[in-house]
Image (cartoon, coloured by chain):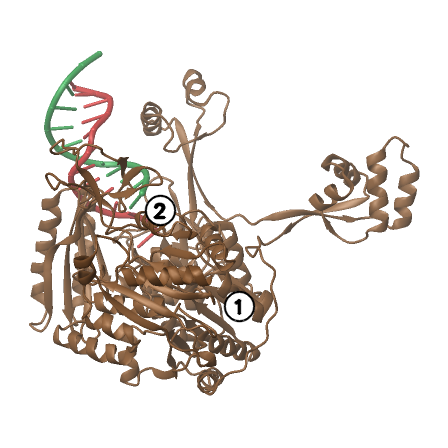
Chain colours: A brown, B green, C red
DNA sequence: AGCACGCCGACT
DNA sequence: GTCGGCGTGCTC
């Protein structure tokens, strides 16, 4: 009886988002297992695509109306997606409205994605003149986008006449790095004999034989060549003569540049001990308990994580620690590696695709038992988890903003249930969702109320900028902040200056007519960049020269407005000419490693002031920083989003925590135009509990999460009318299935109505219990697929991070 | 996605 | 009368 494999094919569409049945050829019967990649024929002709074996079924009842095709090839000797991750992919696809294939690909390193190539070759029937004009003396021709249109036309015609053959090649992008190793293949005595038969002039060969006689272990070919200055041809001769053997050995690319300094567990304070004990108990009892670990900056959360991980390891289990990308600094990685050494694998965006793949394989093979990484590391192929840590659990970067729109925290909770292990959600300012669950005892709350060594909380001053504006000329710096900065310079202490968000600043406006330079593709003003002397669009990347004359009224009074980091830097050098300033924003950290380099410079006291965007608020530990200034606390508050206050509070609390460590008390200045706003007032005293209470009231009153679930539906099209029409149709359709309790907001144009020449419309639905919503949304997606040819795109975001 | 089929306009 | 334009439907 023929066996049947259910295969998820690499064709990301709604219609193909289901397993397809294939016959397993007899030769592959005992090889094919779920989770392996295979090559299958798909569609008409001989087109081949990659697929994932979803299920192998010996007793499947195939649809008698379709004749099954057979699997072409197996791409892996063993499954690369285990049973757990297959199940997870299925769950992800169902909960995020994404294709199963997209979910599978998201879980795996990019190196395992399929690479497709199409090759054409002439048949015997192809006339010789056509053959030479197309193929020259080549046997095969690569058919890709680089082929001229004329050639493509010809090839299509010839294919219709069956005069050429098309071969589809599916391969893995992955490249296992190999190095050539050399080792002696003869005994020292035999080599001695060989040496005597050599001519005196064969200097290099004699050198090689001498080396082989005295060094009996395996060595890298490149190392050997360098050590005794011989070339590879000498080695080849040596191999031919049987002196040595060469072998290509698989190696891992080592992403760690720095050496590890071994560290010991630190002494815990009573609160930490309580937390560690609780987490360890859950690990030991194999209980999928979720802990919410609340502790301000400097309260020693990391040490709790490390000891919980150590316990899991001591039980023979593995551990996963998620950290927001932005905080995944060498400092934090070093701390984990210092404790657990070679067992640690790190996954973050700074790795090359090869390095990432190698780290992934180390995990897959069980060589790495602790994984530290950003969002996508939540899919690390660990098979026996003892604890999962999600640090800074409130961070919005845990949510992926394209398909699959998953939240790493949710995936972590899923995996914990699967592995029967605890999850530790750590934060100084938990998300309202998590804190609310702790309130209802769904999560176990663990508190670290004190800073280690009882450090003082910083002194926070709120500076009313409207007041400042009345007394002084327009400046990014209030007089109090400026005075404080000068003091630090005199005392040789360091300061952090944070500018809230990059985009809302530094635009160009004409003083005469009020014209603001806009992006031609998006509905947003262009931002001034002094370094490149251009105007840039932060959404589509459009770039154009800085105008000196107003394009609208041709007046010459065109001026810069707002504050960007560059402008502040300039202002700073004017106000404090002696200060050494490091600017850190998306522009200065774009290059690989730039982020770390700047931080190291600052840590080494090569600068007095670190000026930057949000990225300076996270995961930095600089003991000599005694002043933190927030230049514009409320840019986020002005946004029409239900999470605006939460974000502002979190950011201010976090950045304030950067001031003053050890014996030096820190000072914080928060400049704002909304000095009485509760998010700002409560950040001043770092009173999370009061903020939580206040914000929950507002969320309750406004029917917002966590009291309501939400789903956001976005439609976009180059034709504005089509996007709007689609949205209207969707609303009408949804209203038929929704109960009267559901609340719909919109449809409205997107916060930025046009991005990259596409118009955006969106709709948010708030609901508590809508059993028919899910299937209605899937129906909308499959209907939209039919229109996708015309350019209409529909995206669904469940539990969106914002309603904008 | 990508391939084939199928139905209308400008050419030998 | 045909070539080939791209709208539509389907892929085990």
The secondary element bearing badge 1 is classed as helix
The part of the image, by quadrant, that contains residue A297 is: bottom left
Real-space CA distance between mark 1 and mark 2, rounded to the nearest whole angstrom: 49 Å
Q: Is residue A57 visible?
A: no
x, y (%) of residue A95? 28, 66
Q: Which sits in the foreground, A577 or A374?
A: A577
x, y (%) of residue A742? 11, 70
Q: Is residue A566 visible?
A: yes
The secondary element bearing badge 2 is classed as loop
Q: Which mark is residue A559?
A: none
Q: Is residue A305 above or below residue A531?
A: below
The reply, left or right, for residue A475 in relation to residue A8 is left
**Residue under circle 2?**
A42
Q: Tell me the residue at 17%/78% (across/down).
A: A697
x, y (%) of residue A797? 23, 61
**Residue under circle 1?**
A335
């Amino acid at each position: 009886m023929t066996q049947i494999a259910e295969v998820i094919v690499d064709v990301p569409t709604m219609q193909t988002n289901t397993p397809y049945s294939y016959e397993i050829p007899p030769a592959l019967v005992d090889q094919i297992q779920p989770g392996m990649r295979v090559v299958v024929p798909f569609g008409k002709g001989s087109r081949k695509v990659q697929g994932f074996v979803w299920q192998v079924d010996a007793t499947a009842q195939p649809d008698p109306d379709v004749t099954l095709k057979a699997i072409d090839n197996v791409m892996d000797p063993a499954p690369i997606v285990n049973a757990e991750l297959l199940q997870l992919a299925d769950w992800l696809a169902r909960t995020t409205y994404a294709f199963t294939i997209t979910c599978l690909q998201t879980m795996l390193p990019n190196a395992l994605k399929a690479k497709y190539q199409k090759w054409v070759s002439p048949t015997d029937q192809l006339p010789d003149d056509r053959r030479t004009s197309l193929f020259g003396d080549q046997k095969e021709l690569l058919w890709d986008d680089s082929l001229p249109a004329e050639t493509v036309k010809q090839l299509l015609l010839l294919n219709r006449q069956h005069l050429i053959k098309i071969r589809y090649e599916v391969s893995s992008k992955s490249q296992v790095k190999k190095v050539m190793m050399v080792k002696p293949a003869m005994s020292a005595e035999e080599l001695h004999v060989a040496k005597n038969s050599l001519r005196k002039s064969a200097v290099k060969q004699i050198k090689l034989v001498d080396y082989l006689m005295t060094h009996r272990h395996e060595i890298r070919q490149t190392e050997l060549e360098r050590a005794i200055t011989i070339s590879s041809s000498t080695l080849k001769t040596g191999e031919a003569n049987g002196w040595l053997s060469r072998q290509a050995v698989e190696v891992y690319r080592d992403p760690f540049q720095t050496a590890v300094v071994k560290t010991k567990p630190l002494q815990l304070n009573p609160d930490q001990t309580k937390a560690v004990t609780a987490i360890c108990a859950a690990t030991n009892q194999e209980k999928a308990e979720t802990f919410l670990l609340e502790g301000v900056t400097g309260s020693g959360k990391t040490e709790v994580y490390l000891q919980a991980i150590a316990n899991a390891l001591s039980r023979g289990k593995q551990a996963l620690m998620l950290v927001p990308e932005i905080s995944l600094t060498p400092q934090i990685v070093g701390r984990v590696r210092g404790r657990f050494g070679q067992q640690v694998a790190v996954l973050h965006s700074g790795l090359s695709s090869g390095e990432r793949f190698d780290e992934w394989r180390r995990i897959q093979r069980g060589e790495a038992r602790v994984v530290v990484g950003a969002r996508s590391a939540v899919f690390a192929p660990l098979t026996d988890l003892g604890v999962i840590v999600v640090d800074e659990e409130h961070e919005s970067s845990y949510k992926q903003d394209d398909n699959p729109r998953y939240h790493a925290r949710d995936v972590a909770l899923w995996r914990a249930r699967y592995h029967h292990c605890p999850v530790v959600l750590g934060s100084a300012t938990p998300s309202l969702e998590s804190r609310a669950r702790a309130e209802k005892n769904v999560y176990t709350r663990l508190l670290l109320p004190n800073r280690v060594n009882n450090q003082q909380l910083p002194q926070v001053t709120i500076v009313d900028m409207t007041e400042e504006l009345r007394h002084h000329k327009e400046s990014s710096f209030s007089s109090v902040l400026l005075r404080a900065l000068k003091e630090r310079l005199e005392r040789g202490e360091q300061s952090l200056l944070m500018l809230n968000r990059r985009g809302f600043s530094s635009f160009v406006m004409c003083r005469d007519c009020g014209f603001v330079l806009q992006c031609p593709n998006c509905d947003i003003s262009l931002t001034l960049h002094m370094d490149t002397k251009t105007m840039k669009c932060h959404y589509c990347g459009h770039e154009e020269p800085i105008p000196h004359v107003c394009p609208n009224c041709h007046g010459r009074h065109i001026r810069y407005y707002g504050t960007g980091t560059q402008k502040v830097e300039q202002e700073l050098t004017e106000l404090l000419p002696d200060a050494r300033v490091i600017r850190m924003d998306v522009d200065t950290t774009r290059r690989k490693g730039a982020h770390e380099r700047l931080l190291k410079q600052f840590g080494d006291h090569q600068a007095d002031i670190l000026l930057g965007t949000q990225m300076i608020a996270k995961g930095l530990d600089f003991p000599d920083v005694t002043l933190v200034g927030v230049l514009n606390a409320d840019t986020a508050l002005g946004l029409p989003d239900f999470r605006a206050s939460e974000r502002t509070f979190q950011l201010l609390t976090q950045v304030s925590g950067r001031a003053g460590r050890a014996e030096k008390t820190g000072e914080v200045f928060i400049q704002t135009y909304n000095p009485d706003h509760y998010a700002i007032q409560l950040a001043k005293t770092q009173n999370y509990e009061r903020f939580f209470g206040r914000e929950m009231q507002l969320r309750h009153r406004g029917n917002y999460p966590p009291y309501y679930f939400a789903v956001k539906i976005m439609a976009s099209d180059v034709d504005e009318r089509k996007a709007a029409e689609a949205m209207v149709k969707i609303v009408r359709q949804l209203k038929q299935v929704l109960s009267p309790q559901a609340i719909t907001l919109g449809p409205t144009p997107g916060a930025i109505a046009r991005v990259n020449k596409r118009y955006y419309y969106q709709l948010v639905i708030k609901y508590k219990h809508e059993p028919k919503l899910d299937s209605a949304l899937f129906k909308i997606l499959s209907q939209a697929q039919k229109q996708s040819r015309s350019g209409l795109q529909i995206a669904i975001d469940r539990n969106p991070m914002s309603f904008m």
